[in-house]
Amino acid sequence: MDQNLPFKYVLSDEESRSLETVDVYVSDVEPKETERIIKFIEKYCPRNEILDHVKRIKKTSYDKGFKLTVLICLVESITITELITLINNYNFGSILKPRIQQVCKYPAITRDQFDEWRNLWPINFHEDFKKELNFTLKEIENIKQYMEKAIQLSIQAKLQGEIPVGCIIIDPKKNVILSESFDTRNSTKNPLNHAILNCINNIASLEKLNYMKKSNKIKNFQKSKVDNAVIYFNEEDFSSQQRDKDNSNSKLVYLCKGYDIFITHEPCIMCSMALVHSRIGKVFYGCSNTVSGGLGSCYKIHTHNSLNHHFKSFKGLLQHKIDTLLIDC
Amino acid sequence: METIHHKYMREALNLAQEAYDNYEVPVGCVFVLDDKIIGNGRNRTNETHNGTRHAELEAIDIILSSGEYTSEVFQRCVLYVTVEPCVMCAYALRQLRIKHVYYGCANERFGGTGSVFDIHRDPKLTLHPAYSCEGGYYREESILLLRKFYVRENENAPIPKRKHNRVLKTEIVPMKK
Ligand SMILES: [Zn+2]
Ligand SMILES: [Zn+2]
């Protein structure tokens, strides 16, 4: 059953693509011949790996019974003349009459795609996609609370003459806020001080302080040393034991690994890529950003094939609140 | 032929070397205004524990915090960077309305000015003007420095990767047109 979630999953291109088809040869067959024919096809006809998601047999039911149709192979892999010669050579000429049929070209990833595409010709479907997108009622409640917090920060930003975008980074396993921040482009006169970069910088400063403390480079942990950050966590909140063991470059890659971010507005392209560089877990945002958004609107950086880290993004969370509170953002 | 661009790119390469010497991914850059370097930067992701502290962002912050310039200065600046800017930095530069970018080698994994995306000139992005971008200045030197870095990283890794990663390859495939 579908959950009624207060946010929408931001689909990748593969997940949102509409039906594309490819031509194949098929033939109606007598049910009692099917086994023999499938053996012939598997042994002698071109094998097409791109059709692995497509079922070999289609069953069409009628009032009085059913009809079976088998898929032979891709049209592009053999000409009809060659195929008929092949069929005749193995004495299937009387029972295999190839004709052209369209099947869907790509595997269905979402249930919606599956429900639509299967009408053309039966296909396989593994619903592992859904599992990660289920949330408990408690989780949904927390998610809303976190976005409320981000909205509070955006209001605070607005009161201080900043662009009203607020964000927080949390550790979902411990249910604790690690860093919170808002846009400071105006006061700092730096056009790049967006909420997310500020928030990541806070986490990094803390990570570094913690690291230095652990390696006895400084004796006392001084919160005041961290610029512009409100910090809730104590040192145990950093799972840095493992990180400290590995003093090579790779540990930095994991700065936000397993953490989630809540931000009132869809991150711009710069911030979206900063989240890739930081290996963020999940992203929740309220309003979409049609002019520079990197997680759905202008680009889908969170799912792009050539980038080395992917994450799930959700949009529309408490959007009505953000829309009404911050009209001029 | 040695051009003025090579002169500035040499400066950027020196910074990349400094990054390498400090166990950072060797990328360096300089911002040039009216034939004068007004700021430089190099990768500091390791030192800062922050995967976003790329050479370009380092240099931009140095320039803006010097108090000598406002952010409008970048509209008159040219950037020389040893490796193609990543997607993040490419959009940072667009927001600053940078005039022009020269880079050394392409960045196949993250490049935002041609390799993965065309952030510098994508007409969909209407908030800030497009900028032009040109690669190939001291390209071989930039690549070799990166390769040296990854070979060293791999040697120091707890479980070294396959053998061919440990050998410094010196032949370089010609640049794609
Ligand atoms: Zn941003
Ligand atoms: Zn970058």
Image (tube, coloured by chain):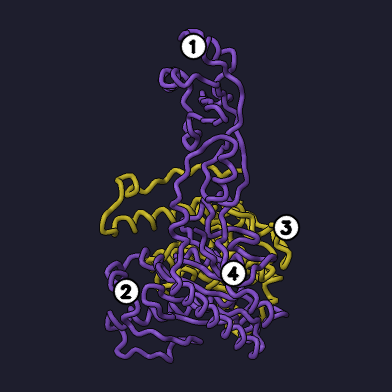
Q: In front of the other: label 2 or label 4?
A: 4
Contact, mark 3 vs mark 1 (Cβ under 8 Å) = no
Where, by quadrant of the figure, is residue A326 drawn?
Answer: bottom right
Q: Is residue A171 visible?
A: yes
Residue ID at (56%, 45%): B175
In the rendered image of the structure, the colour used to display chain B is yellow
The residue under label 1 is A92
Image coordinates for residue A180, horizontal then vertical, percent = 50, 82
Q: Residue at x 71, y 59 (%)?
A: B124
- Hue used for the chain lettered A: purple
Q: For numbered disc 4, what is the local secondary structure?
A: loop
Marking on residue A187 = none
Circles 4 and 1 on the same subunit? yes
Separation (CA) of disc 2 from disc 3: 43 Å
Residue position for label 3: B123
Q: Quarter of the image holding residue B4?
A: bottom right
Residue B11 in sight: no
Residue in the image at 43% along x and 80% along y: A178
Q: Name the N-terminal-most of marks 2 and 4.
A: 2
Q: How crowded is the residue under tag 1: few (<14 C-alpha within 10 Å), some, or many (20+)?
A: some
Q: Is residue B159 left or right of residue B169?
A: left
Residue A145: x percent and y percent? 50, 80
